[in-house]
Amino acid sequence: VQLQASGGGLVQPRGSLRLSCAVGEGASRTYVMAWFRQAPGKEREFVAANRWSGGSARYGDSVKGRFSFSKENGKKTIYLQMNDLKPEDTAVYYCAATARGIIVSSMGVANSYDYWGQGTQVTVSS
């Protein structure tokens, strides 16, 4: 399964940015999609996730109320709308997918995902 993330860049604190992740070949095999991020020297952190079939998106504690996960099933594309960005949001953002029917409590676990995009850099700085 091919994942292509885009939309990263440099933004000032309190600014907004929208990331996209297009699922290419093998998209029909995916079931749950997610965003993770990794800052230098830190472990990969869960950001948001949801099933293609719908339901409520799940969010990491540090982004709740500021980030929003959305998707376009027809285009097999997911988005991450990031508002009120803070310097601590600076990281490489990765989209991920799994073909497994994982339970909700596992959506925030990186090992639940089998496929990863190449990552897109988000830098929040004045």
Image: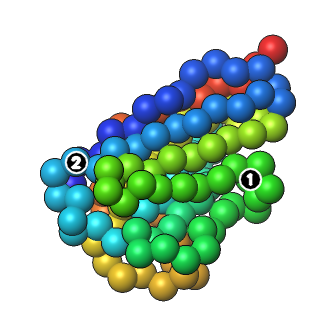
Residue drawn at 42 percent across, 55 percent down: 72
Percent position of residue 8, x then y: 53, 28
**Quarter of the image where one finds residue 65:** bottom right
Horizontal arrangement in the rendering, residue 103 relative to residue 68 (left or right)? left
Residue drawn at 60 percent across, 29 percent down: 122
For badge 2, the amino acid type reads Gly
Horizontal arrangement in the rendering, residue 82 relative to residue 87 (left or right)? left
**Quarter of the image where one finds residue 76:** bottom left
Percent position of residue 46, x then y: 59, 58
Please state which of residues 90 and 80 is positioned toward the viewer in this rendering: 80
Helix, strand or loop at disc 1? loop
Name above or below for residue 100 compared with residue 30.
below
Q: How is the image coloured?
A: rainbow
Name above or below for residue 74 compared with residue 94.
below
Name above or below for residue 85 compared with residue 28.
above
Residue that label 2 marks: 24
**Which image quarter holds the N terminus?**
bottom left
The label on residue 31 is none
Q: CA distance from mark 2 to mark 1?
A: 27 Å
Residue reaching furthest to the top: 126
Percent position of residue 24, x then y: 22, 48
Helix, strand or loop at disc 2? loop
Are dots 2 and 1 in contact, CB under 8 Å? no
For badge 1, the amino acid type reads Val
Residue drawn at 53 percent across, 64 percent down: 49
Residue drawn at 55 percent across, 77 percent down: 55
Please state which of residues 42 and 18 is positioned toward the viewer in this rendering: 18
Residue that label 1 marks: 63
Q: Residues within 10 Å of mark 1 (few under 14, many from 20)?
A: some
Looking at the rendered image, the disc whose residue lies closer to the viewer, 2 or 1, is 2
